[in-house]
Amino acid sequence: MSRPAISLDACGLAAAYGAGQGSAEANVREALTRIDALEPSLGAFATLERERALELAAGLDRDRAAGVPMGPLAGVPMALKANMCWKGVEAHCGSRVLAGYKPPYTATFVQRLLDAGAIPVGMTHMDEFAMGSSGENSAYGVPRNPWDTRRTPGGSSSGSAASVASGMVTIALGSDTGGSVRQPAAFCGIAGFKPTYGRVSRYGLVAFGSSLDQVSPFARSVRDIERVMQVISGVDHADSTSAQLPALEPEFSESGVRGLRIGIPREYFPAALNGDVRARLEEAKRKWVELGATLVDVELPHTEHAIPTYYVVATAEASSNLARYDGIRYGPRVEGDGSLQSMFAATRAAGFGPEVKRRILLGTYVLSSGYYDAWYNRALRVRRLLRQDFDLAFQKVDLIIGPTAPTPAFLLGEKASDPVAMYLSDVMTAPVSLAGIPALSIPCGFVEEAGVQLPIGMQVIGPALADARVLHAGRVFEAATEHHLRRPPEGQPKAAGTNPGVRA
């Protein structure tokens, strides 16, 4: 098998390509070869855009030969989540209701990556409309964790996380609504970053919860995350929620994190926290102290209300956003008995999966007359309290750390019949999403379960717009440890129940 895709940070791939070393076409062919070898056991990709990727690579090689300046990500193979618009490429969002839908335009963040020379090789599997924490809610296929194919890679950005962790691609994009990039990053032992809300344009991201969704990158190193953020961040006048700020510029400091005050919220270390996760976080705390940071106890008292608040706000927004899928404007149509209402009902019944239907019903209920004030308005008030908790904590500290997820990656099927248990997978990530602040998940150690080594993720959280500070601290911690250098075992057998294969 060919070698894994190499981190930009590890070898300066983009810089080397711009200097005339190697070829973009060779990079893409290497990525496709690795995908072909690993895809039967991992099932990360929904579609592969082989010809289009090779055409883009050939165009880059011609431009470089002609002396055209190369972008910062020139020749880098990458993957996109299947809820992102790339003109002419199927974006089914893991749902049958959008089967065959090919957007007529390209998302702002995708275009910025293309302009920087990155080469998307395909679209990755995901929970339907980004609703899930395990990848099991997809209508098309269930991705597997590269560390143990019996386990989930997390969700909803399942395929993107698995594609980076396995070395199929160098970078990938996911979307984070309540933890859908940070939790899979933790389960797969890679870096995943949710920016401050509005820092990256959402134009061209198919909506789930409009006040929560954020385009978020995966990579094997924090430095690679920073490189991607430099490209995709910045104001976009096509998105009314875009922050009026220039592209992110990384922070560099010779003092590292010395003197930084790092908050430790007791609410993120409850008695029920998995013992192995707690042990790895205690080791991480000691490492922060060794690096010169000061640990400070802080309180986030409304954390316990985050999950119910999230599932009121997010489902209310989902019920509104998904009302457009009625068989008229997008995707396939089911005629029903011939009436308009019957066509709506039949199309949605056939197109949406159980979890999406559950959330639409819940969201419609909390927005309905007589219940709006009791549920939705109350959830908005609690959301403000959660934001205030963070604001008060950040008056005392510069950053906050805690576990990304309460457990290591769990077995596929383990929580499929218990929606509440599945929702609790986001207990550490949902508060950050509701507050709209930046957070990074990076590996902080490993645990052994049933003879298998599984990664544990640590979440580094910052105040609003302190994205560069969060990434700088994560980069310093990463440089002082070796957790991010470990790679999943290869050659695992194809697990039963993998997806039937990608469309190429």
Image (cartoon, rainbow, N blue to C red):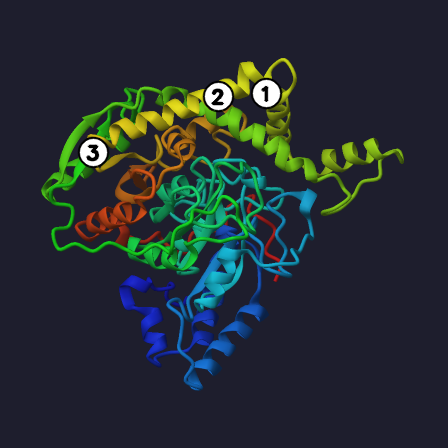
Determine the residue positioned at 33% across, 79% down. 19
Q: CA distance from mark 3 to mark 1?
A: 36 Å
Determine the residue positioned at 51% across, 33% down. 413
Secondary element at tag 2: helix
Image quadrant occupied by the N terminus: bottom left
Q: Are marks 2 and 1 in contact (CB under 8 Å)?
A: yes
Instruction: Looking at the image, tell me whether mark 3 or mark 1 is earlier in sequence order.
Output: 1
User: Can residue 308 be seen from the camera position used here?
Assistant: no
Work out whether 197 lies above or below 50.
above
Check disc 1 and report the residue beneath it: 366
Check disc 2 and report the residue beneath it: 379
Where in the figure is residue 276, as x and y percent of width and height? 26, 32
Q: CA distance from mark 2 to mark 1?
A: 10 Å
Secondary element at tag 1: helix
Residue type highlighted by circle 3: Val
Given residues 127 and 63, the one toward you in this image is 63
Instruction: Looking at the image, tell me whether mark 3 or mark 2 is earlier in sequence order.
Output: 2
Kindly identify which numbered label has been placed on residue 397: 3
Q: Is residue 317 left or right of residue 449?
A: right
Residue type highlighted by circle 1: Val
Kindly identify which numbered label has been placed on residue 164: none
Secondary element at tag 3: loop
Residue type highlighted by circle 2: Ala
Instruction: Looking at the image, tell me whether mark 2 or mark 1 is earlier in sequence order.
Output: 1
Given residues 394 and 425, the one toward you in this image is 394
Q: Are marks 3 and 1 in contact (CB under 8 Å)?
A: no
